Image (cartoon, rainbow, N blue to C red):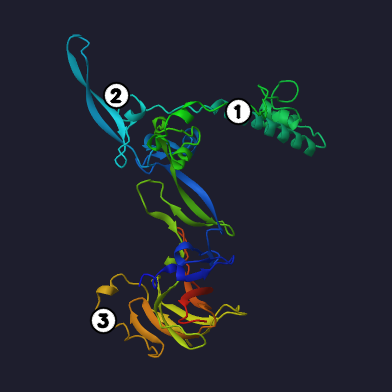
């Protein structure tokens, strides 16, 4: 049953030709077209920590290197570390002969039992905010490279701007009228943005690395002492800290947890939002959610008879209407089918689906009383669901069928306050579907 209802067996063809299940595709109500993940542009709305749910603006997240300053990951098993409190005895400042308890905190992993005391990190007096991050030994070199290439990009940008300026126009009247800054005036004049003479140069000359054949010899402990595998880090643990890449477990330090993002998807054609979540990190709701399974009829596989090569077989499918309106659906064959597709005999006529009603499953009223269904095609009807049969003739070992589904879509036009309400627009949409039904019985 799990394989029958698995959504990856029923694929919807996007406008770009990609095949996706209905759970991984969007519907643009402005273009009236399907959009997959490659047909939308992704925008970062907010940064947040999945552990403490702290919201962080984008400039602050960029300054903190997209890391949370209060939450840490275990360097041994990569799970979230928790803060544990304990008390230690310290000398009393008033009487040195006596001791007094003091509350301190340290980090501990609840899965592998790793603690910050294992690597010699001192306990902190506060529960959060007092943990120091280990300094990257290559930070100075990285800063030099970033500064060098930043100045190099600035120099190339100035050269491109000077090539574009062929004539020098008078800009003094614009400066007197609008009061432009000195930097903008010098840029219009084709001069450097600063008052320094000459081109901008790097404050420190970049030193290029040189290749060498001299390699430091291995220490004698590699040859004389036995290797204890429990004290050596794994490849996953080393790559978890690429700036340090520790060799021994005694060099593992807790890593700040990376921030997560909430992103919105926008259609690349009309640039309207298809998905936009709320900014609150603890909220799972969406301001805009145009997922396809909210607007497009969903097709599922219910029952497949035994498939025999070059013999007529029956398949029972289920149609689900997610909209609060009646849905009229027809099926059409695809044009120029490929050789790996089996021939299919689709149900003739039109299938009508009832609108979605969340209270219908608690209602005992007969669902067939308002519809005249052909019993040879329609197998059952329940609320907004309908079962139907169609036949096919497998031509290859892997049975795949493809056809077009045509249905009506009622686009509810949103009006602003004070405007006259407009009538809903009825649009007929056609989607290409590809269904994988399994393999034939016996040898091919």
In the rendered image, the quadrant that contains the N terminus is bottom left
Q: Is residue 187 visible?
A: yes
Q: Provide residue 155's location: percent of width, then percent of height.
A: 71, 31
| Element type at mark 3 | loop
Seen in the picture, residue 435 relative to 140 is either above or below; the reply is below
Q: Position of residue 44 (x, y in %)?
A: 49, 47
Q: Earlier in the sequence, mark 3 or mark 2?
A: 2
Query: Which residue is more in the foreground, 75 or 299?
Result: 75
Percent x, y of residue 437: 46, 76
Q: Which residue is mark 1?
A: 215
Mark 3: give few (<14), some (14-19) or many (20+) Cα within 10 Å.
Answer: few
Closer-to-camera residue (330/326)? 330
Image coordinates of residue 193 in percent, x first then y, are 69, 27
Decide: marks 1, 2 in contact (CB < 8 A)? no
- Residue highlighted by disc 2: 125
Q: Nearer the viewer, mark 1 or mark 3?
A: 1
Residue at 17%, 12% in the rendered image: 98
Label 1 vs label 2: CA separation? 45 Å
Q: Nearer the viewer, residue 232 or 332?
A: 232
């Amino acid at each position: 049953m799990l394989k029958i209802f698995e959504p990856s067996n029923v694929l919807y063809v996007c406008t770009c030709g990609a095949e996706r299940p209905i759970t991984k595709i969007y519907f643009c109500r402005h273009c009236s077209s399907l959009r997959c993940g490659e047909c939308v542009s992704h925008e970062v709305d907010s940064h947040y920590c999945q552990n403490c749910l702290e919201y962080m603006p984008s400039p602050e997240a960029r300054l903190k290197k997209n890391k949370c300053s209060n939450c840490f990951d275990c360097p041994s098993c990569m799970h979230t570390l928790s803060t544990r409190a304990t008390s230690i005895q310290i000398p009393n400042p008033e009487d040195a002969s006596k001791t007094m308890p003091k509350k301190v905190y340290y980090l501990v992993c609840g899965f592998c039992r790793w603690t910050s005391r294992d690597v010699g990190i001192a306990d902190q007096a506060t529960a959060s905010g007092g943990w120091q991050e280990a300094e990257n030994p290559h930070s100075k070199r990285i800063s030099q490279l970033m500064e060098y290439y930043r100045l190099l990009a600035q120099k190339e940008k100035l050269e491109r701007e000077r090539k574009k300026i062929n004539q020098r126009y008078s800009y003094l009247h614009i400066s007197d009228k609008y009061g432009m800054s000195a930097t903008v005036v010098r840029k219009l004049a084709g001069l450097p943005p600063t008052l320094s003479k000459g081109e901008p140069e790097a404050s420190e000359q970049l030193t290029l690395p040189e290749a060498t054949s001299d390699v430091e010899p291995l220490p004698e402990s590699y040859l004389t002492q036995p290797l204890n595998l429990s004290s050596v880090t794994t490849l996953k643990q080393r790559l978890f800290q690429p700036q340090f890449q520790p060799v021994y477990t005694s060099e593992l330090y807790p890593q700040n947890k990376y921030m997560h993002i909430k992103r919105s998807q926008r259609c690349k054609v009309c640039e309207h939002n298809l998905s936009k979540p709320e900014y609150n990190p603890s909220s799972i709701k969406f301001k805009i959610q145009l997922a396809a399974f909210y607007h497009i009829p969903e097709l599922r596989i219910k029952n497949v008879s035994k498939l025999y090569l070059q013999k007529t077989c029956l398949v029972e499918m289920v149609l689900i209407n997610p909209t609060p309106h009646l849905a009229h659906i027809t099926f059409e064959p695809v044009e120029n089918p490929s050789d790996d597709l089996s021939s299919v005999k689709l149900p003739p006529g039109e299938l009508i689906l009832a609108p979605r009603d969340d209270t219908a499953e608690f209602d005992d009223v007969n669902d067939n009383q308002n519809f005249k269904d052909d019993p040879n095609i329609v197998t059952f009807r329940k609320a907004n669901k309908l079962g139907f049969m169609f036949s096919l003739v497998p031509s290859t070992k892997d049975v795949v069928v493809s056809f077009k589904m045509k249905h009506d879509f009622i686009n509810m036009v949103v009006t602003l306050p004070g405007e006259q309400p407009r009538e809903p627009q009825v649009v007929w949409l056609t989607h290409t579907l590809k269904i994988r039904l399994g393999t034939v019985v016996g040898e091919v």
